[in-house]
Amino acid sequence: MKIYTKTGDKGQTSLYDGTRVYKDSLRVESYGTVDELNSSIGFAMKFIDDEEMVEKLKKIQMRLFFVAGELATVEEGKYKYKVREEDIAALEEIIDVCLPEISGEDKFIIPGSSKASAALHVSRTICRRAERRILTLKREEPVSDVLLKFVNRLSDVLYTYARYLESDLTIMDFEKFYNERL
């Protein structure tokens, strides 16, 4: 298999359904950011010792392929593997199980008390960027409401997992920090 096709040398790429678009189109930017998110989650998993969490994240990674595939398809009906409402319910279940285990602090935290939580916080911020890119695309072209909701809920899961793995919560004390010198 050749890794290079030379068909993108002039700044265009083919979507899943064969449609040619520029590589900086909103659609490519959207599924490209989802791809970045998927890679980031894979990286974060290398720091996580909780096997159940790793298994859930692997399943989430597979769903992100569905998200990217759906975003990479313009022609309705050409891509059949779409995220579903039950996928969103599964994400909500993850949150509901983990939330009682997280400290009661409802303040801004400084990410990075452990490698695992820091890596998941990076994934969370990439997920939020993916959501923004998808929302921008949705203003121009049809995008499934379920897909957008899935990405939104996924950022909540990543936040929840990151908080769950925080080894030493660092609360942002705005008043104290504001008065300190750098």
Image (cartoon, grey):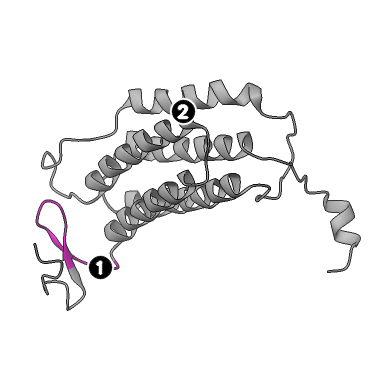
Q: Residue at x 31, y 37 (%)?
A: 63
Q: Residue at 17% across / 77% down in the picture?
A: 9
Q: Is residue 127 left or right of residue 63?
A: right
Mark 2 Cα within 10 Å, few/some/many (few <14, many 20+)? few
Q: Mark 1 vs mark 2: which is more N-terminal?
A: 1
* 47, 178: nearer the viewer: 47
Spatial CA span between label 1 and label 2: 37 Å
Q: Where are the magenta residues, as a range?
A: 13-24
Q: Is residue 70 left or right of residue 36?
A: left
The numbered mark at residue 104 is none
Q: Position of residue 173 (x, y in %)?
A: 83, 49
- Of the residues shown, which amino acid type is indicated by label 1? Lys
Q: Nearer the viewer, mark 1 or mark 2?
A: 2
Compared to residue 171, the image places residue 10 above or below, namely below
Q: Which mark is residue 52?
A: 2
Count neighbours of disc 1 (C-alpha within 10 A) and say few if under 14, some if 14 to 19, many if 20 or more.
some
Amino acid type for the residue under numbered disc 2 = Glu
Residue 61 image offset from top left, x and y in percent: 35, 41
- Whether 22 is among the magenta residues is yes
Judge from the rendering whether residue 50 lies leftward or rightward of residue 74; answer left or right.
Answer: right
Residue 182: x percent and y percent? 83, 69
Residue projecting furthest to the bottom: 10
Check disc 1 and report the residue beneath it.
Answer: 23
Left or right of residue 108: residue 138: left
**Residue under the image location 54 percent in, 50 percent down:** 119
Helix, strand or loop status at disc 2? helix
- Residue 164 location (% of width, % of height): 62, 33
Q: Quadrant of residue 181?
A: bottom right
Q: Is residue 143 visible?
A: no
